């Protein structure tokens, strides 16, 4: 696939996938590798090991593979580095360019003696007299070893995981809002904890006066109109939210589910322009749930009491929430119980401990809600809305 006069896409596209086990995916994904051709030929990243054979075959159909001078490893994670050893079988002399931290991740993964060139921000690789690649480190976006590389005169930013998305359709043809949505899902689940660093990286791009005409990430679509995603990232790294309030619940015998529905109906009546969305957390990938948290100012969560605490599914939800280190969200807690009823109290406590702002009052219903309990649920909803104070 043509990217520019000096760059071709040589990755693995969705048709090649039958399954994947990546934690962030909800759909098949595209891994991008790029071939830069000047007087010398360089590769940026590879593909997962499972696709190494196909990757090599494809490369051989495009160039004399032994003419490759170097491989730039923007990130040592296996989805981008997995085909390295297979590539080195073909081109044993290959020079590898990575960061200091990249050395650690590459040797840690492959236990091989690579021909490494360690690079830092602003260092430049001359592909020939005209074509130059400038490196920009991006530590902890999202591993210590990540970097990006800027190609001139083509004005392409090879951005590693930043600005990437998981998307199943032909990415070049996908419409902008689908792409942005997919990129937001990726940001929420990968970059949320590193938003301060993302802000610094975006500033570096701005103040470095890079003229960026195209962003070529390691996953998904290439951005031909980069301002769209650059502006979106500026908002996301400041945790911008939208007009949505999710209600999450787990429920074994549908009592907590009834509460969720009643709260949803009540909230819809008072919440002006906000869209209320109800999720049974067992029916959605956790990454989707985290996405909705990322874009919302607050949420409600319901749990039955199970073995003196909240349910195991809610525990998994909380675990992920904790790991992603969202800024404080305003949370309401509700649920049904039988005889001891610690579920909601424990959940409130644990949410507070991870820095969330939890409404003092919880809604607790004994066994299954009757009409009186549903009335109380509506009153609770009004108080949650007041607590949200939007
Ligand atoms: C395996 C299991 C363990 C439970 N443990 C407790 C408990 O420790 N304390 C309690 O108050 N209720 C306990 N319950 C009762 C539930 O909280 C109660 O049935 C509640 O109404 C279920 O809400 P749901 O309809 O949303 O599933 C337990 C229920 C199950 C199935």
Image: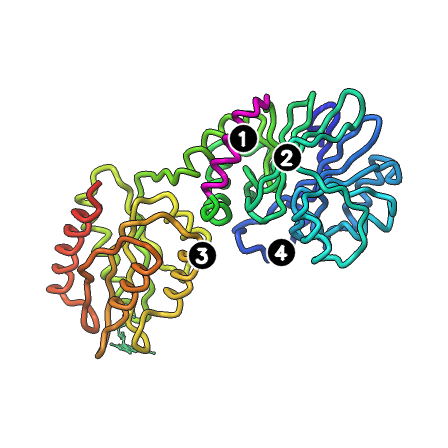
Q: Residues within 10 Å of mark 3 (few under 14, many from 20)?
A: few
User: Pointers 2 and 1 in contact (CB under 8 A)?
Assistant: yes
Distance from disc 4 to disc 1, alpha carbons, whole Å, reads: 37 Å
Note whether residue 255 is visible. Answer: no
User: Pointers 4 and 1 in contact (CB under 8 A)?
Assistant: no
Distance from disc 2 to disc 3, alpha carbons, whole Å, reads: 29 Å
Q: Secondary structure at mark 4?
A: loop
Residue found 62% across the figure and 35% down from its top: 136
Ligand 1: does it lie within 8 Å of the C-beta at label 3? no
Distance from disc 1 to disc 3, alpha carbons, whole Å, reads: 27 Å
**Which residue was labeled with disc 4?**
19
Q: Residues within 10 Å of mark 2 (few under 14, many from 20)?
A: some
Q: Quadrant of the N terminus?
A: top right
The answer to whether 246 appears left or right of 365 in the picture is right
Q: Please identify, in this view, whether the residue under mark 4 or under mark 2 is nearer the observer.
A: 2
Q: Position of residue 339 (x, y in %)?
A: 21, 79
Q: Which callout, 2 or 3, points at the residue further toward the start of the chain?
A: 2
Q: Which residues are magenta?
A: 195-211
**Which residue was labeled with disc 3?**
323
């Amino acid at each position: 696939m043509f990217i520019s006069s000096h760059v071709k896409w040589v990755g693995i596209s969705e048709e090649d996938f039958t399954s994947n086990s990546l934690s962030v995916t909800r759909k098949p994904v595209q891994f991008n590798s790029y071939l830069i051709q000047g007087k010398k030929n360089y590769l940026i990243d590879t593909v997962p090991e499972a696709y190494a054979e196909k990757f090599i075959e494809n490369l051989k159909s495009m160039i004399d593979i032994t003419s490759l001078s170097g491989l730039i490893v923007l990130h040592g994670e296996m989805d981008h580095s997995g085909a390295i050893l297979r590539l080195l079988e073909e081109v044993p002399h290959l020079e590898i360019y990575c960061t200091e931290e990249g050395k650690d991740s590459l040797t840690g993964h492959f236990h091989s003696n690579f021909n490494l060139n360690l690079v830092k921000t602003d260092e430049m690789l001359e592909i020939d007299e005209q074509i130059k690649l400038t490196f920009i480190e991006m530590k902890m976006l999202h591993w210590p070893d990540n970097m990006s590389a800027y190609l001139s005169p083509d004005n392409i930013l090879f951005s590693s995981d930043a600005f990437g998305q998981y998307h199943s359709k032909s990415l070049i043809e996908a419409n902008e809002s689908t792409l942005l949505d997919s990129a937001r899902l990726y940001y929420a689940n990968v970059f949320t904890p590193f938003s301060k660093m993302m802000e610094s990286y975006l500033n570096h791009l701005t103040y470095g006066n890079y003229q960026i005409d195209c962003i070529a990430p390691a996953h998904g679509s290439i951005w031909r109109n980069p301002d769209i995603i650059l502006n979106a990232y500026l908002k996301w790294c400041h945790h911008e939210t939208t007009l949505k309030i999710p209600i999450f619940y787990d429920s074994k015998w549908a009592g907590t589910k009834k509460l969720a529905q009643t709260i949803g109906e009540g909230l819809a009546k008072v919440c002006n322009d906000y869209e209320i969305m109800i999720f049974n957390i067992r029916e959605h990938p956790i990454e989707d749930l985290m996405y909705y948290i990322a874009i919302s100012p607050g949420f409600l969560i319901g749990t039955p009491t199970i073995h003196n605490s909240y349910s195991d599914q809610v525990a998994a939800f909380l675990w992920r929430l904790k790991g992603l280190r969202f800024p404080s969200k305003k949370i309401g807690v509700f649920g049904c119980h039988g005889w001891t009823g610690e579920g909601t109290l424990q959940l409130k406590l644990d949410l507070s401990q991870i820095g969330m702002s939890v409404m003092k009052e919880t809604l607790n219903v004994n066994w299954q809600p009757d009409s009186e309990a549903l009335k109380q649920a509506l009153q609770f909803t009004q108080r949650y809305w007041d607590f949200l104070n939007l």
